[in-house]
Amino acid sequence: MARERKPGDPSLDQVEVHFEETGFQGRIGREFDGPQLREFLRRGSRLFSYPGIELIAKGRNRVGILTISCPNGQPEKLVIKEFRVVGLDRLKTFRRASKAYKAWQGALELLTHQVLTPQPVAFLEKRQNGFVKEAIFITRMIPEASEIRGLLRTRRGEDLRSLLRDLAEFLRQLHQRCLLHRDLSDGNIMVEERGQQRKFYLLDTNRLKKKKRLSSWSAIKSLIRIGVPPAEQKFFLRSYLGLAHLPFSAWAWYKINKECFNFYLKFKKF
């Protein structure tokens, strides 16, 4: 049945679904709720064998792309992400929200605050004895956008600084809304460029948090996973803070946390 609208609730215009044959349940955005999508979702964990799906990642989490026909008759490309829940991760899910549900809520929270993210289409989860067994999150695809990772590596000079300036402004506005993306990496920021205009989109919204108050220290620390070239890190942080001169304390905090994170990545690889 349709979910009742509540004041201040970002989770609007959605329909609850429950597929008894596979044990999956979740929600669908009303504008996408049509026969083809329901047939797709009814497959549950077997949806990655659906005809026409293109598998683009098959590591810890599987990701695929599928084109469906919406209720209005228009074709729509969707991105499907399956969260693998194994080992200790499964034990942490006892009577707690799945990553798919958190991603759904995080995306709606961003959209409520006018921050761009691929439009959520649906999420599904399957539980066994109170533990999450499988979880799936589906969004609309943005074909014109690309990961910022590649642009940060290939841009030079004023082209790079222009990109960093716009990115800094986008992230400053995100943090002014007290929204903290706790996995703000290159792969989770998409850029759509049309001439001199840029739009930024945030992915992997399952770790998003709406804070009552977001300190500048926490905000700056959240920037360290972005692969800004070392020579431009001061410029990026100065642009983010909106200051002509970068305070030593802010620069030291950023660098200390970034070096610790880099050491962690090296240790993890080792």
Image: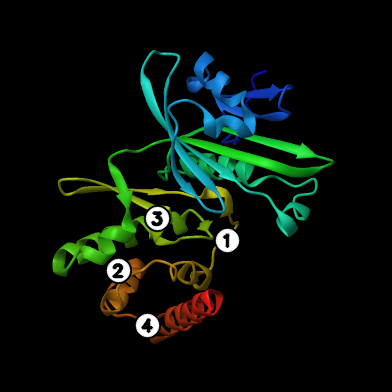
Q: Earlier in the sequence, mark 2 or mark 3?
A: 3
Instruction: Of the two numbered discs 3 and 1 on the same chain, state the one appearing first in sequence.
Output: 3
- On the rendered structure, is 11 left or right of 116? right
Q: Residue at x 59, y 38 (%)?
A: 136
Amino acid tagged 3: Gln
Q: Image check: 200 left or right of 161?
A: right
Residue at (32%, 75%) from the top-left corner?
233
Q: Residues within 10 Å of mark 4 (few under 14, many from 20)?
A: few
- Disc 3 versus disc 4: distance between alpha carbons? 20 Å
Do we see residue 9 in this rendering?
A: yes
Q: What amino acid is labelled 4 in the image?
A: Pro
Quadrant of the image occupied by residue 95: top right
Residue marked by disc 2: 239
Label 4, label 1: how far apart the Cα atoms are: 22 Å
Identify the residue under disc 1.
213
Q: Which is more N-terminal, label 2 or label 1?
A: 1
Marks 2/4: CA–CA distance: 12 Å
Viewer-proximal residue among 166 and 147: 147
How far apart are the two marked residues, 3 and 1, measured between alpha carbons?
Answer: 14 Å
Residue located 39% across and 54% down the image? 189
Q: Amino acid at mark 1?
A: Arg
Horizontal and vertical percent for residue 185? 44, 61
Mark 2 secondary-structure assignment: helix
Q: Is residue 43 left or right of residue 71?
A: right
Q: Of marks 3 and 4, which one's residue comes earlier in the chain?
A: 3
Q: Residues within 10 Å of mark 2 (few under 14, many from 20)?
A: many
User: Which quadrant would the N terminus be assigned to in this image?
Assistant: top right
Element marked by disc 4: loop
Amino acid of disc 2: Ser
Q: Residue tagged by mark 3?
A: 173
Q: Which residue is mark 4?
A: 247
Report the Cα–Cα distance between label 1 and label 2: 22 Å
